Image (cartoon, helix red, strand yellow):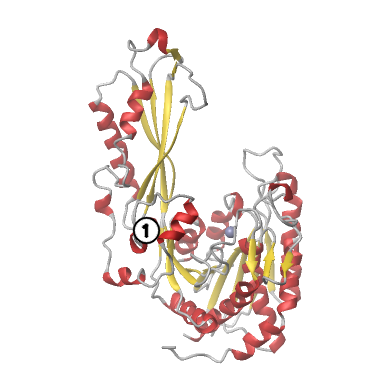
Amino acid sequence: MAFEKLDLDPLFAKIEELKPQFIDRLARAVAIPSVSGDELLRPRVVDMAHFLVSELENLGAHDIQLKDLGTQPPPVADASLQLPPIVLARFGADKSKKTVLVYGHYDVQPALKEDGWATEPFTMHHDEAAQILYGRGTTDDKGPVMGWLNVVEAHNALGLELPVNLVCCFEGMEESGSLGLDGLIAQEAQQYFLSVDTVCISDNYWLGTTKPVLTYGLRGCNYYQIAIKGPGADLHSGIFGGVIAEPMVDLVQVMAKLVDNKGKILIPGVDEMVAPLTEKEDALYDDIDFSVDELHAAAGSETGLYNNKKDILKHRWRYPSLSIHGVEGAFYGPGAKTVIPSRVVGKFSIRTVPDIDSAKLDKLVIEYVQKVFGELSSQNQLNVELIHDGAYWVSDPFNESFTAASKATEHVWNIKPDFTREGGSIPITLTFEQELKTQVLLLPMGRGDDGAHSINEKLNVSNYINGCKTLGGYLHYYGRQ
Ligand SMILES: [Zn+2]
């Protein structure tokens, strides 16, 4: 190891010793079906918040607050449906120590045995032979949330002070758009979260199944639609075919000019905004544990656009992509319906990366679509617009928080972590960074094959227990700097 190792042996030994209690804590959490997307289960989401409060109290947390977020905005069946509270708690208030905010969510995705689960999703099943814990929320995100509590318990059992002040922020609506969280973070930035030095989020996964990772970037997404309107109603091609300007004909021609079938974005000026690849960044891709076969396995086909690991990862993480999603208003069923749709709406999105300027991108996209449509000299009407956007996030993987997490990971797993990004987004990452003006670290616990939103969600016991050591070790390495 190329760094000075801290003596964490007593802490790690205590975590091993407490393994049965930690597994039991996770089982008790999994048993509460805190499905935020199901209005009927909302009381159970609230139960889960109270479960956390009682665990936090038992562990000696102070200033525990349940932040009321009011009622859920529409669309919702019950207009008076309350949002689940955000649970805030503190451990320690020592001005000489750094303060780490840890974020996690206590709600989960829906799950029914009938969906194809091998065991009851809300009864944690411990497969002793394989050392795997099955159940909804084991990896997303109850395992990591219990992980932070476990770290505190291990310190308490040793009579050891935490090396930092810990601020917990646990939300109950993450799987349903994190309603209310942005506002709460802004509101508490100068209150509860004042003096937070850094933020650690444990709510994503290793890239693969064998090597730990630290995640330093997420792509953003700008979603657009192109509406083309012609006749006053849908028409019959036997009567109007050949004599009327068809919106669908215009739309396919416009959409064909957005991206080619090798993934190249055809809108001028987009690629020019992408940050150049530095040698230092390029080198990060060399050691990453990933293969072309993994892409093919995940996609269920051998139709990848790139034949080597580095190109695949770069195009997933650090280059933009344009995907065509669908056409609203078009005939899409089986059979041979001879309709001429009167109005069609094409949907596409661009995954964004540094240094794409979102407003400039919108302007480029809209003007380009208008130009391409103009060249068709169509009598139909065009309307192109942005319908949703979320910004990208990228951090410095060499900053002090990542450095501390890297040391902790290497200390626990005896291997340097891969530095990864993700092709999708976790919007809250950027909110924390901007509102608290701090660095954010994504420190995952589970593996890439955990099946977070799928059937038979699981967390390997080794990931849970070593994950606790890594979270705890991170606090020590970070607190020492
Ligand atoms: Zn999650």
Disc 1 target residue: 312
User: What x and y, as percent, mark residue 367?
Assistant: 28, 36
User: What x and y, as percent, mark residue 385?
Assistant: 38, 35
Q: Circle 1 sits in a helix, a strand or a loop, which is it?
A: helix
Q: Is residue 337 above or below residue 291?
A: above
Q: Quadrant of ligand 1?
A: bottom right
Question: For residue 149, what is the image quadrant?
Answer: bottom right
**Residue plotted at (27% across, 51% down):** 271
User: What x and y, as percent, mark residue 88?
Assistant: 65, 66
- Give the quarter of the figure containing the N terminus: bottom left
Q: Is residue 216 above or below residue 238?
A: below
In the displayed structure, does residue 154 sit left or right of residue 311? right
Question: For residue 393, what is the image quadrant?
Answer: bottom left
Q: Is residue 274 visible?
A: yes
Q: Is residue 361 above or below residue 194?
A: above
In the displayed structure, does residue 28 sit left or right of residue 359? right
**Residue plotted at (34% across, 24% down):** 249
Q: Amino acid at mark 1?
A: Ile
**Residue plotted at (70% across, 53% down):** 117
Question: For residue 349, what is the image quadrant?
Answer: top left
Of 315 and 175, the residue lying toward us: 315
Of 212 and 358, the residue lying toward us: 212
